[in-house]
Amino acid sequence: MKTELSGSHAGGSIQSSTAADAVNDIVMAGNKSKGGRPYFLEDPAVERVLNITMAVAAEVAVLHERMDTIERILEAKGLLNRKEIENYIPDENAAEERQGWHARFSARILRIVQQEVEAIAHPENNTPMRTIADEINEM
Amino acid sequence: MPYQLPPVWTELKQHAVFPEFSHDERARYNFLANLNRFISTVIAPGNQLAYAKRVEPAFVNANGRGFADRFEVGEAMKQDPVYQMWASLRRSTMEMRQQNGRAVVLRQAQQLANRVAKELEHTDLLQLKENFQVPPYLRHVDNHLMPGSYHTEYFQGDVSNAANYDSGLFVTSGGMLGSLTDGGGRAIAAWIKETYPDFHPHQILDIGCGLGHNTLPIAIAFPDAMVIGIDAGAPMLRYGAARAHALKVQNVKFIQADAADMKEFADGQFDWVQTTMFLHETGGKSIHKIFKEIGRVLKNGGLNLHIEQPQYTPEMSMYEQFMRDWDAYYNAEPYWGHMHDLKPEELMEEAGVPKNKFMQVGVKAINDLDKKKQDGKVTEDYGRSPIWNVFGGWKAE
């Protein structure tokens, strides 16, 4: 499997005659360019997370645009009235289901922050696992 | 003033060899164009504020003097959280733009190569060379963080990197270069016609033409001339020739050649030699060979013009020089800084243009997507705005 091809043909000798032999599109799409990558934030780990977050943000935007396309096509076909969507007010049952979805969504995103809080709230539950392993060996 | 939205990606003209995009691939580019617009108009001005309000005052306070050069500005700005976040986001968008664009073209790389080959059947628009030596300054770096740069071919007949460039420049520029990404070429052609209505060139050379974005507007504006575009990158030339054929521009050729050694052209062959955003992607020794060669192939009394970003001059603030230098280091255009330190009138003398025939003007992109929505005001986004410095002159008779 070819994983790194960027710049490898400088000067012009091409080993492959077809794309099927030469191209692994999933990996090569994300090839690194030449030169050391600069990190601007003080902690490179934070910058990595920022990059992952921005990529996820892109995919959220893509989903939103796809949903918008679906709504417009359905409306054009008379299957949907987007004003109805804008003016939609959930009944009691639907409201509870939807609010529950939002709550779980927030909880999933902020899991790590929640657990930091739990760690402070219950210091007795923060024993390092190596210590626990030794302890449990005596049990 | 209301927020100015970039045009949607689908306003790009889909010529016959343009890569195919799925719905979500288009949406990814719409996201990135908007993200870039937001970063450049809302977040980037924070750099100027941080500089003026705290970075410079703190430096003066600590050192009893102002900044000596743009590198000192850079060291101080690196400590500022607003700059750090802006720079980190900007780098991130550049990398995302490459990954998303490459994902589109690499999955259809063979089809693109086949479409280009078919478009070029029975044409003589393209001349590639066996064993062509790609100049060292190109092999040394992946310009604009584009893996493989302009010249890498992953297989025979490959045009992937050119198709990626063509379909993705929209994202980086926020759609400000027009539906064929040709705002620079249109601007220079219009400026020449207006400023020199009696200039009727027959042979025009466009050096570093890439895939011909800015070459075709010149060919269209001067239908009686033959325009020759040269470049080192085979994928760019192949794709560019096919694109020109698809757009029915006939008075143009794409030839693989080294600008520092244009042995295929005769002394005094050209009435006009043009480069567009090319010089800053060369090298510190090569640039002088290139100007000498330009002087050789340009006929006496001929015109030589270069579209570039502004040179760094003592009148330009240290802050602006630093901001303009950003792309040099962080968008992989490392010759950018050194090139903009040169004196253009001295370069032109190397091409045979005397100082009294030297000229320098500012030119703004002609964007057919503008639709008068925008009021012509562009937030300065150093190195990215579609506003250029044109320098050049007329070779001595």
Image: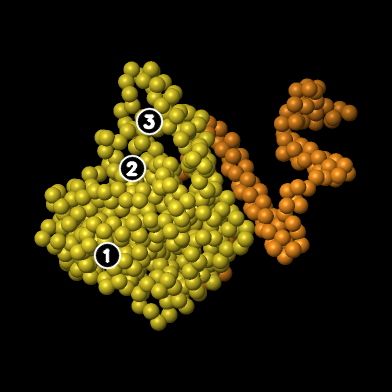
Tell me which residue sits at (15%, 56%) in the image: B352
* Chain letter tied to yellow: B
Would you call the spot at circle 3 few (<14 residues within 10 Å), some (14-19), or many (20 or more)?
many
Badge 3 is on which residue?
B73
Indicate the secondary structure of the residue bearing disc 3: helix
In-front residue for pair B265/B225: B225
Amino acid type, label 1: Leu
- Percent of width and height locating residue B200: 22, 67
Would you call the spot at circle 2 few (<14 residues within 10 Å), some (14-19), or many (20 or more)?
many
Q: CA distance from mark 2 to mark 1?
A: 26 Å
Q: Using the rendered image of the protein, determine whether residue A30 is visible from the camera's viewpoint.
A: no
Q: Mark 1 vs mark 3: tell me if same chain.
A: yes
Q: In this rendering, is residue B18 above or below A97?
A: below
Tell me which residue sits at (43%, 42%) in the image: B379
Q: Mark 2 vs mark 1: tell me if same chain.
A: yes
Mark 2 touching mark 3, by CB under 8 A? no
Amino acid type, label 2: Gly
- Give residue B228's quadrant in the image: bottom left
